Image (tube, helix red, strand yellow):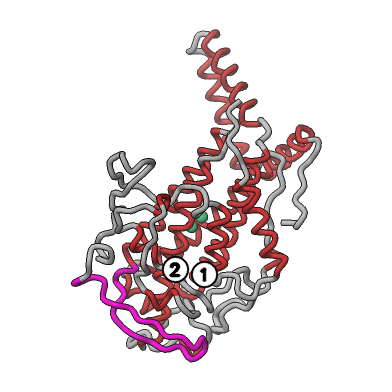
Amino acid sequence: MQSDIHHSDNNDAKETTESSQLATSFSGPSRLARRSFLRNLGLGAALLVPGAALLSESAKARDLGKKNNKALTRGDVAILQLLAAAELIEADLWQQYTELGGVDAPTTGYTAGLQILDGDQLQYISDNTDDELSHAAFLNAYLKSKGEQQVDLSQFKNLAPSQVSFVPQTGRLTNLKQLTVDTSWWTRYRSTTNPDFGATFPNAVPSLNTGQHTAIPRSNAELDDPNNPSDHIKAIAFTAGFHFGFIEQGGTSLYATLAQKVTSLEVLRILISIGGSEIMHFQTWQDKAGNATPLTDFDPINNSSVTFEDLATGQPETLQSNLIMPEPCEFISPSLPACAIIRPSGPGQLDATGAINSFISDGLFVGQSAQFLQLIKSLARAADAAERQTD
Ligand SMILES: [Fe+2]
Ligand SMILES: [Fe+2]
């Protein structure tokens, strides 16, 4: 995105141009074939359906078209732009996980470590990556279709990737080598209390929440033997396993929080539908992270150590690994019965600013420019300032 997001004064004119451009880009031969097929079907149907019904159907279609072309409110645009930025950030980090731990990654000690968490872990990593790429592409295309400014963060892709030889040596937006992973989402979803009422939660893996840790192997020397992975590469894979849950619980709450501020029903549909897929990701990862096997490892590069405990046996309910369904907790009012929900979803938690701040505390942007941080913080502030308009 250009740092100066500006909006067209002449939305209608811009919208027409942009939608015709969009239409042009989609009009390949298969689309033409489908269009003529539909036209033929329409002609056939005219022989069977009374004229009045046909007219009213086309009037309805015209109305729907008008509604879809209605300009978005400033608030809805700000929300969609912040989400597009968040999805580009997610796509960047998931891409790095896929290169080293996806289904097409070479077999290494890292993929072996990831597969301790689940035999299908590599497939899930690739699929989560595809989903994030689709979220970012869709949100930007939707903004464009409404004549609004898209988000492009490519100028900030300057961080060094892993030096592992099969990783493309291109600049990245996010840093996965110096993370401080907040694992309190684990205990939060196993608790009967809710952060929206001020509750706080201990970390499931306290050592991940202090110092810096890498979630990807940084060089060939760390890749290790896939048939007998060392505790060091297993610790890196398990760090990734808990980081996956951290990222996707953030998306889960971010969409639920921002959905309460949108004005357009179509934008609401986008938020609850993409948000639902973030929830599916989160649920998958929180099922897998608990399969980490007990170990302690010291990382000489970050000068930090990490300890994973066995969460599968002998743990209290706030840590027990198979308690992956959201424990019912207080919601809306403490006088109402406890309810199984995603949380938090109130302001000042994982709203736009909260989510971006949690990415910053996570270390994802260690090494990023002040200009980048300023841009995403201002996008977050604009999204949080959005207000639902009812008339
Ligand atoms: Fe996403
Ligand atoms: Fe996500």
The residue positioned farthest toward the left in the image shown? 314
**Label 2 CA crowd tier, 10 Å (few <14, some 14–19, many 20+):** many
Quadrant in which the C terminus appears:
top right
Q: Residue at horizontal 33%, vertical 47%?
A: 330
- Residue 3, horizontal then vertical, whole percent: 75, 57
> What stretch of residues is rendered in magenta?
289-314
- Residue 128, horizontal then vertical, whole percent: 46, 60
Label placed on residue 236: none
Dot placed on the residue nearer the N-terminal end, 2 or 1: 2
Q: Residue at horizontal 68%, vertical 44%?
A: 144
Residue 150 counted in the magenta span: no
Q: Does the CB distance between marks 2 and 1 fall below 8 Å?
A: yes
Task: State which quadrant residue 264 falls in.
Answer: top right
- Residue 164, horizontal then vertical, whole percent: 54, 83
Q: Tell me which amino acid carries mark 2.
A: Asp
Dot 1 corresponds to which residue? 362
Q: Tell me which amino acid carries mark 1.
A: Asp
Dot 2 corresponds to which residue? 182
